[in-house]
Image (cartoon, helix red, strand yellow):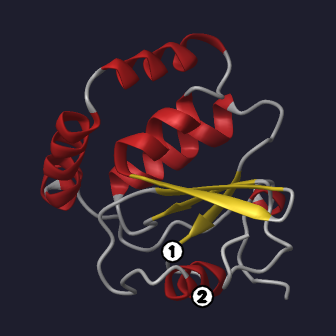
Amino acid sequence: MHPTLPPSLPGKLILFDSQCNLCNGWSRLVLERDRDAIFTLCRVQSPAGRQLLERLGLPLDHYETVIYLECHGGHCDEYHRSAAALRIVAQLPGPWRHLALLRIVPRPLRDRIYDLIARNRYRLFGRPAQCRLPTAAEKHRFLEELNE
């Protein structure tokens, strides 16, 4: 486990920017395709998201990456940018998992493309009028508060 992360974290946790239309679309895609509910989502704007960013030593006011935490046996592996996105799609059912084949592209090139899209995501995809909040039916799939 990362020394500053609580041991009660879900096994597969995705942190995303809920003030970004692209990120919200990504979270909806994961929720709809993840039929076995293996992923838990966490908005970086939520109390849990802010605490996790702080504990990971990441900025609290500038989000340019999806963060994926895979926790098992008291240890969390941390993935960012293209590595996070590809690790997530590899675990989705159906044709989505084939996108993971993009791992053959060298990480520096993948991350350069990822960063270009991330830096321009608000201009390209816009911002929602308000943060995406989980619906009543989705609430069990979201981490909003940390239990320590």
Does residue 80 show up?
A: yes
Could you say where residue 109 lies in the image, as x and y percent from the top left?
Answer: 17, 35
Sooner in the amino-acid sequence: mark 1 or mark 2: 1
Does 96 appear above or below 20?
above
Q: Residues within 10 Å of mark 2 (few under 14, many from 20)?
A: some
Q: Amino acid at mark 2?
A: Gln
On the picture, is 66 further left or further right than 61? right
Does 37 appear above or below 139?
above
- Can you tell which quarter of the image residue 80 is in? bottom left
CA–CA distance in space, label 1 to label 2: 9 Å
What residue did someone put label 1 on? 44
What residue did someone put label 2 on? 51
Does 41 appear above or below 129?
above
Which residue corresponds to the image point at 56% horizontal and 69% vertical from the top-left?
43
Which residue corresponds to the image point at 56% horizontal and 19% vertical from the top-left?
97
Could you say where residue 69 lies in the image, as x and y percent from the top left?
Answer: 62, 58
